[in-house]
Image (cartoon, rainbow, N blue to C red):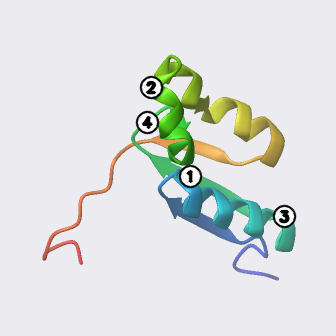
Amino acid sequence: MHLHSDRIKVIVAGGGYAGLAAEISLRQHCPNAEIILLDPNAFHLRRTHLHESLRQNSASLRIPFAHIIRRFQFRHVQAALEFNRETL
């Protein structure tokens, strides 16, 4: 009898490029993993395209996490992490 699940559970902190790359890589290498993305925003901001905000509406630089979730099957929790001496 197994006392624990064989399913890996991972929390990715931050929905920027590094966080999304980690989530996508985890999904590719551990397709059965339960992945939770923790980010205070409801959207990913395409920061490499910020120069375009001068020419167009900045809303076009936002990709809702709901769209990304459909493609890569993870859960998004809209919350912020705060680190200080006690939490570290």
- Name the residue tied to disc 3: 32
> How far apart in space, not on screen, are marks 2 and 1 (Cα)?
30 Å
State the residue position of label 1: 37
Element at label 2:
helix
Q: Give the label, 4 or 2, closer to the camera.
A: 2
Label 1 sits on what residue type?
Leu
User: Could you tell me if the residues under marks 4 and 3 are in contact, i.e. CB atoms within 8 Å?
Assistant: no
8 versus 13 height, above or below: below
Q: Alpha-carbon distance for marks 4 and 2?
A: 22 Å
Q: Camera-side residue: 64 or 35? A: 64
Determine the secondary structure under disc 3. loop
Q: Earlier in the sequence, mark 4 or mark 2?
A: 4
**Mark 3: which amino acid?**
Asn
Of tags 4 and 3, the one toward the viewer is 4
Q: Which numbered disc, 2 or 1, marks the residue that appears first in the sequence?
A: 1
The residues tagged by marks 3 and 1 sit, at their Cα atoms, a distance apart of 16 Å
Q: CA distance from mark 3 to mark 2?
A: 42 Å
Task: Quickly name the residue at label 4.
Answer: 41
Residue drawn where x is 21% and y is 72% of the image: 87
Category of crowding for the residue at label 3, using alpha-carbon neighbours closer than 10 angstroms: few (below 14), some (14–19), many (at least 20): few
